[in-house]
Amino acid sequence: MELVWLYMVLIPVQHVLAVTWLYLAKQSSLRGALQDPGDCKGLRGLVEEQVRICQRQVEAMDAVKHAAELAIEECQHQFHARRWNCSTLQGLQVFGKVTIQGTRESAFIHAIAAAGVAFAVTQACSHGELEDCGCDRKIRGVSAEGFQWSGCSDNLSYGIAFSQAFVDNPERSRGISSSRALMNLHNNEAGRKAILSHMKVECKCHGVSGSCEVRTCWKVMPPFREVGNVLKEKFEGATEVHPKWVGSRKLLVPKSSRFKPYTVHDLIYLLASPDFCDWDPRHGVFGTSGRQCNRTSPAMDGCELLCCGRGFRSAHTEVVERCGCKFRWCCSVTCKQCRHLVEVHSCR
């Protein structure tokens, strides 16, 4: 979903640059477009060090673009029924000011974006698309369960290292005195940990008539949808923090002693979120007026919560669906088109 940004908003430069690389998702395919390292300077949204990484590893940029697409798509899937639904803008700041406000929404964006780069680059390694990496051959020998480690394990360590170098750089350039940088770096790492902690084992049986006398196994990443599900749960249980100096180090600690201590797997945020109910371009909030809602749901997608108590309008609309499908030998399926009226509800 695209919204046209009609307002000029002044935002501190050091905050704006954090995830502007997501703008790669809105640029045409990079495959074949980057013939020379010098072409990297023409990519919008990259900070200086990211341009240098592009120049050193031009072939990886198609994976980075795919990562941006994955992150945006997953964000919109996870939040499609909430007041903030990851609507994207036309400018470099793809999600608008939400990404720089230090809220739990910003925490999720940073986590899913960092995870996206680790995931897409690792996938490119496994597919043989990058010269600098391939499968992870470090896992060898016999496991405690008795199977033989072999095959092409996903080289997640390479993908994580690339993500740390590429995604974290705008934050590290701010210096450790920035609370927002500390927050974003923590959430970036939590995003990558969501993949690492959910790696799966796949196996192949060997033996007479598939007897599975011997199994060879390898490690693979979880589907990215599973990563999104994990981070959405972390979003729901995110910890509000505030800065505290411990000696010469600045740390982010839970704002209240009643809050649980957070781990490297959890998301953290500095500021409470706005309610996202009303159009407020100054703060990058588009409101929920006109959004479709579920009249019978008590959850966030329900008309009462999604419409913020303003009420809703109901209307009937015609829906065309495939129906009466039949399989014809061989080998096709033919269907009819059925039309029926459905009632839809939208927020006032």
Image (cartoon, rainbow, N blue to C red):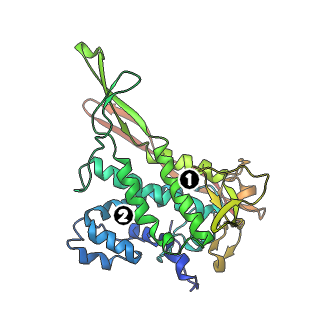
Count of labels in the image = 2
- In the image, 32: left or right of 229? left
Look at 75% across and 62% down and name the residue there: 308
Amino acid residing under circle 1: Gln
Residue 63 sits in quarter:
bottom left
Q: Is residue 334 above or below residue 163?
A: above
CA distance separating discs 1 and 2: 20 Å
Q: Is residue 203 or residue 319 the one in the foreground? A: 203
Disc 2 packing (10 Å; few <14; some 14–19; many ≥20): many
Q: Is residue 148 or residue 337 the one in the foreground? A: 148
Nearer to us of marks 1 and 2 is 2
Residue 192, image x and y in percent?
A: 48, 52
Residue 25, image x and y in percent?
A: 40, 66
Look at 79% across and 54% down and name the residue there: 257
Q: Is residue 338 visible?
A: no
Look at 44% across and 68% down and name the residue there: 22
Mark closer to the chain start, 1 or 2: 2
Residue 338, image x and y in percent?
A: 48, 45
**Quarter of the image where the C terminus is located:** bottom right
Look at 47% across and 65% down and name the residue there: 168
Disc 1 packing (10 Å; few <14; some 14–19; many ≥20): some
Residue 318, image x and y in percent?
A: 55, 54
> Which residue is under mark 2?
65
- In the image, 49: left or right of 266? left
Q: Is residue 176 above or below residue 255?
A: below
Q: Which mark is residue 194?
A: none
Q: Is residue 173 above or below residue 116?
A: below
Amino acid residing under circle 2: Lys
Residue 204 sits in quarter:
top left
Q: Which mark is residue 78?
A: 1
